[in-house]
Image: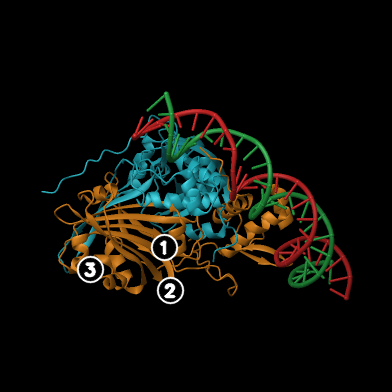
Chain colours: A orange, B cyan, C red, D green
DNA sequence: CCCGATTGTCTTTTTTATAAGACATTTAGT
DNA sequence: ACTAAATGTCTTATAAAAAAGACAATCGGG
């Protein structure tokens, strides 16, 4: 299965160290082996080790102190902006108000066969296609490609799109969103998405595809969303209800945006999350 | 933000074409530009174009016909094994029965500070750490790293782990799982996960971190799961309930495993999904 | 204050990826 | 059967990444 397109050695080592750190195999604030040691251990040159460490440092995962060594610096400093889960979409609407939106492109296109099928429309039907980027604190965190049937898209303007969440626009114009399907997956960043999200090409992205239907069964919105996983993730709290025979997990809460953590590699000494644990009775 | 670790040209082109195909900018079964044309268009040599196309072909995204050209071959042939959403975990338990499990490693370790905090335990407490790979039809689709407090882990054997889902083992030994938190994100495959999941290093992975608590508030399971997004994804169907004033989206269904599609590059002519659309009334 | 070990920054050589082109093979159409 | 255009497979030259080593700058500890 592995093709000949082997990653470069530096990238390989980067991903290896990254995996170890994320998994906690190297504890927080612990010193990594020295560069010469890593070079020998992995059978590569020090230049290569250095490139891998450079990338880790720019990710904010390690901190390098000349003369002392390189140290693991708080891997997961994600702190929440919690929200309700039962209303995933509603939450997104509300969040749309707090965050900024950049409209990248806006046009009318013919539906591809695949798109038409997903929206339960006739193939070749005209669709309004818009590409937007959502920002939080001026930092992009999601890349959204939306397709809406032309006649529906006519009910709002291009300017509306840059300021108001789409679902709100749709309901405002009398449409009823009754059913929706969502698929959450992962993919690699292509040049477009990477550029819009200020990421390297080939970075990991959280993807969500959502199709919203009106009571008649016809689709009124097709959304392909790509998220920077370090700035956005899906959270849910579950509780077990019901007796032992018919036990169930019921959602209580979900979808939260992580406030970005790193971003500035030369910041004021990595703060690690407070221990805040509880002693046993 | 972009570091100096630029992807190679072949990889860059691969991700570019991949993005275009997934986004439907090149329709299904349509012919791509010829190799020389692509080379000129992107300012690279034909060898590089060729390497990018090789990778796309091994992903099953394109089909190359000597003398004719290269064609897009059904990008998303994912077909379901649907399940209920309200009981995400229950579903996983049931699915555990249908799929195979390979136990990769099994050991007792000291809790890292981060792990102890997530489980609300004392730092340094002994944990049972197990690494498993879940298979569906003999193909790996998830890589699971589980941490369980030692005394709890004692209640079952290593062999149990390879055959029975962990949550079932826990409840079988009298423990009550009352609360759980899940976080869904995305990450890049390191060497370990990539090897276990039969993927290239640097592939995109769906990640889920789950922590289960008993009524006392102490954690009894910490699961770090990595999924191959082409074989596993989270699905949910939502319905809008309630009146216009207090409209809500309520989940109806979720978590499904896609039956794998490609995998064998030399298979019996790519079958494309049946059109199966509906005509308007 | 010095010593040893570390990261930071060069240079030079070797290895690998890419570029450029020639030519064979397959296919669809005339 | 022939032709035009496509992929498949080479060869050789160039550009870029990696290896190997030297040396300076910084830090911590004895």
**Could you tell me if residue B86 is visible in this image?**
no
Q: Which residue is mark 1?
A: A232
Q: Which chain's residue wears label 1?
A: A
Q: Which chain's residue wears label 3?
A: A
Question: Residue C2 lies in what quarter of the image?
Answer: bottom right
Q: Position of residue A172 (x, y in %)?
A: 18, 69
Q: Which residue is mark 2?
A: A138
Q: Does B197 sit above or below residue B6?
A: above
> In the rendered structure, which disc, 3 or 1, sits on the residue that comes first in sequence?
3
Give how far apart the Cα atoms at labels 3 and 2 are. 23 Å
Picture disc at residue A169: 3
Q: Residue at x 45, y 64 (%)?
A: A197
Q: Secondary structure at mark 2?
A: loop
Q: Does B150 sit above or below residue A59?
A: above
Q: Residue D13 versus residue B44: which sits nearer the camera?
A: D13
Taking the view exactly as shown, the residue that stands out farthest to the left is B281
In the rendered structure, the answer to whether residue A26 lies left or right of residue B186 reads right
Q: Secondary structure at mark 3?
A: helix
For disc 3, the neighbor class at 10 Å (few under 14, some 14 to 19, many from 20) is some
For disc 2, the neighbor class at 10 Å (few under 14, some 14 to 19, many from 20) is few
Q: Residue A253 versus residue A200: which sits nearer the camera?
A: A200
Q: Secondary structure at mark 1?
A: loop
Q: Residue B202 versus residue B214: which sits nearer the camera?
A: B202
> In the rendered structure, which disc, 3 or 2, sits on the residue that comes first in sequence?
2
Q: Position of residue A49 (x, y in %)?
A: 67, 55
> In the rendered structure, which disc, 2 or 1, sits on the residue that comes first in sequence?
2
In the rendered structure, the answer to whether residue A103 lies left or right of residue B125 reads left
Question: Residue C3 lies in what quarter of the image?
Answer: bottom right
């Amino acid at each position: 299965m592995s093709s000949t397109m082997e990653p470069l050695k530096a990238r390989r080592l980067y991903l290896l160290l990254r995996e170890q750190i994320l998994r906690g195999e190297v504890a927080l604030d612990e010193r990594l082996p020295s560069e010469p040691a890593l070079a020998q251990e992995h059978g590569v040159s020090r230049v290569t080790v250095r490139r891998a460490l450079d990338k880790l440092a720019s990710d904010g995962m390690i901190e390098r102190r000349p003369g002392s060594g390189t140290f693991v610096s708080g891997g997961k400093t994600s702190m929440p902006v919690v929200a309700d889960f039962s209303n995933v979409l509603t939450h997104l609407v509300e969040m749309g108000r707090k965050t900024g939106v950049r409209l990248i492109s806006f046009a009318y296109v013919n539906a591809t066969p695949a798109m038409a099928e997903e929206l339960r429309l006739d193939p070749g039907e005209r669709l309004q296609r818009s590409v937007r980027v959502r920002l939080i604190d001026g930092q992009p965190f999601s890349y959204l490609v939306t397709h809406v049937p032309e006649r529906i898209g006519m009910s709002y303007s291009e300017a509306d799109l840059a300021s108001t969440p789409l679902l709100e626009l749709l309901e405002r114009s009398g449409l009823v969103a009754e059913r929706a399907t969502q698929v959450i997956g992962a993919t690699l960043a292509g040049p477009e998405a990477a550029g819009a999200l200020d990421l390297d090409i080939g970075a990991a992205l959280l993807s969500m595809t959502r199709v919203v239907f009106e009571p008649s069964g016809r689709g009124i919105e097709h959304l392909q969303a790509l998220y920077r996983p370090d700035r956005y993730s899906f959270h849910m709290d579950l509780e077990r209800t019901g007796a032992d025979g018919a036990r169930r997990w019921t959602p209580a809460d979900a979808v939260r945006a992580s406030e970005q953590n790193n971003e500035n590699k030369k910041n004021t000494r990595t703060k690690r999350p407070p221990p805040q644990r509880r002693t046993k009775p």
